[in-house]
Amino acid sequence: MRNANHIAATARVAALACGLVVMLPVSGGAVAWLLAAGNLGFVAHAQAQPSALSQSQSDALAAYNKAVADFKSILSERRAQIDARQPLPNLPGQALYLARNNMISAYKDLTDALPSRIGRPNKFEIPPAYFDADNEPLLDEYANVFKVMQAPPANAQPSSTPFDDVVALGSAVARARGLDAANADVAGRLSLGIFFAETNGNQNMGNARSNKYKGSFQTGVSEDQNGRKRWAAIKPSVAAFDPALSARDDKEEARAGNSDQRYNHWTAVRNAIMNAHADIFPQIPAIVKALPDPIDQMRLFELIQIIPSPTKAALRSGNLAAYRVSDPTIMGFLRNNSMFTFGRVDRAKTSASFREILDAMWLFNDKFERALAKYNEIKGRKQG
């Protein structure tokens, strides 16, 4: 989720889910899948297809069946390697991530060709035209496998209050940048959204798709160091209005010592917010006015992680929703982060407005909704 100044193609993880499978052929051209995830077992039958399919429809069905089989194969392989404690390949999540994307993409092509294949809603809130709800256990297992592959290192320094820390730090930075209490609260909520978007709310996480981006906000070394320097510049201001938070910061700095601060949850969050978001916080009142939906606000701040320069340009434009992106490199970054990625129609897009980009971030919806629920829980606890 980085811009063209940093990377060729950022590897990010949107930890969705999956299940282990054995494919069993059944009569009539249908396919039954026996899936096992832990103690869970069940059989999900593919919907029967009309007897007369056009060539393009048959091709779409065959491509989807192959994509599902390929996804199950690499998922099963990774699970077997993990369970046998075998060494994993470099970037072990990349092939799995691409296989998941291919499955979703092939399903969208299938439902474009056969709209009758669009089924019931799914728990991940993926549009039904893109995902067969019968495959929910596959995405559950996908998340479980990624969680193992991205486990924090042994020397990571966790927090007993990881979510509260994110909200407190986001709010404190916003106050130091001149926002009032109400808008500083919004900054805390938005920071929590970024935490969920980047790591699914898992602190000190590694990255199975990148050797560069690590920790609770998935930052690179240079980004972390830049944020640390910028924090030092505002620390006196923070200490003046929140001495308790400043004292906690002193303890975490001492705890981290000379280690990689990306693996201390507190310092990782603090440095990441200062690096990427602190300069945007003063615009929160205007952002809230332009995007009153809290989920849209979280989407926008996640775009600052993914395509910072175009997002800042859109904010300056005076018409955020209508601002268009057409640079092929930027469109590539969006696709690498699961926007305009799935199906031939989406992949054919050569430009998009920010409204279209925000709407295309549906794979983040579940994360942002859980972030919002956690924020409301924290806020309610404090008010109580």
Image: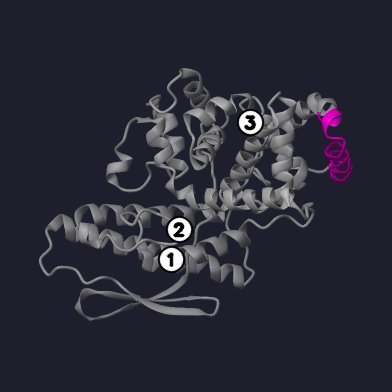
- The mark that comes first in sequence, 3 or 1, is 1
Q: Are marks 1 and 2 in contact (CB under 8 Å)?
A: yes
Q: Secondary structure at mark 1?
A: helix
- Residue 228, image x, y percentages: 77, 32
Picture coordinates of residue 149 (x, y %)?
Answer: 61, 59
Q: Residue at x 33, y 57 (%)?
A: 128
Q: How is the image coloured?
A: one colour
- In the image, residue 30 lies in the stretch drawn in magenta: no
Quarter of the image with the N terminus in it: top right
Residue 34, which numbered label?
Answer: none
Residue at mark 2: 124
Q: What residue type is disc 3 on?
A: Ala
The residue beneath circle 1 is 136
Lower sequence index among marks 3 and 2 = 2
Q: Residue at x 41, y 52 (%)?
A: 101
Disc 3 element: helix
State the separation of the CA atoms marked 3 and 1.
Answer: 34 Å
Residue 276's disc number: 3
In this rendering, does residue 75 appear at all?
Answer: yes
Mark before the other along the chain sequence, 1 or 2: 2
Towards the viewer: 4 or 292? 292
> Marks 3 and 2, Cα distance to the nearest angstrom?
28 Å
Q: Residue 278 location, x and y as percent?
A: 67, 28
Q: Which residues are magenta?
A: 238-258
Image height of 176 relative to 107, above or below:
above
- Cα separation, mark 1 vs mark 2, equals 8 Å
Classified by dominant secondary structure, the portion drawn in magenta counts as helix
Q: Nearer the viewer, mark 1 or mark 2?
A: 2
Question: In the image shown, does 90 or 199 lie closer to the viewer?
Answer: 199
